[in-house]
Image: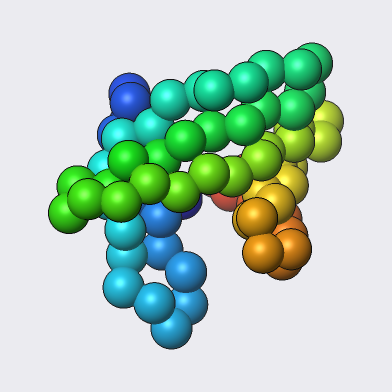
Amino acid sequence: MFVSGSKVTVTIPAETPRSGTYKISQEDGDNLTLVFSRAEGGRDEARLRFVGEESLRWSLPEGPEIVLVRAKN
């Protein structure tokens, strides 16, 4: 996931990268619900939960969860 301002590109192995914009539709402490609007049309929703300062859990509506860890320089 690459984010710059309100633009985002999401790359999932075995799928074509998706680019578009996002906005926060709900916030509850460390939990966010985001709505992604794809450049080619269509919308996706995801739940994000911050775990400390180093990782993020991304839950998809279908059930899978992806854990993102901040890259270290």
- Above or below residue 61? Residue 2 is above
Task: Measuring from the top left, give residue 12's x and y in whole percent.
Answer: 47, 69
Q: How many marks?
A: 0
Tell me the residue at 74%/63% (across/down). 63
Task: Measuring from the top left, give residue 64's x and y in whole percent.
Answer: 72, 66
Q: How is the image coloured?
A: rainbow
- Above or below residue 47? Residue 15 is below
Tell me the residue at 45%/48% (across/down). 44
Q: Nearer the viewer, residue 3 or 39?
A: 39
Check the image and name the residue furthest to the left: 40
Quarter assignment of residue 32:
top right
Tell me the residue at 76%/17% (across/down). 28
Quarter assignment of residue 51:
top right
Quadrant where the C terminus is found in the figure: top right
Task: Measuring from the top left, give residue 35's x and y in whole percent.
Answer: 47, 35
Check the image and name the residue furthest to the bottom: 14
Q: Nearer the viewer, residue 19 or 38?
A: 38
Residue 54: tell me if it is visible. Answer: no
Task: Measuring from the top left, give residue 6's x and y in whole percent.
Answer: 33, 26
Q: Nearer the viewer, residue 45 or 20?
A: 45
Q: Is residue 39 left or right of residue 33?
A: left
Q: Is residue 12 left or right of residue 6?
A: right
Residue 71: tell me if it is visible. Answer: yes
Quarter assignment of residue 33:
top right
Tell me the residue at 67%/49% (across/down). 58
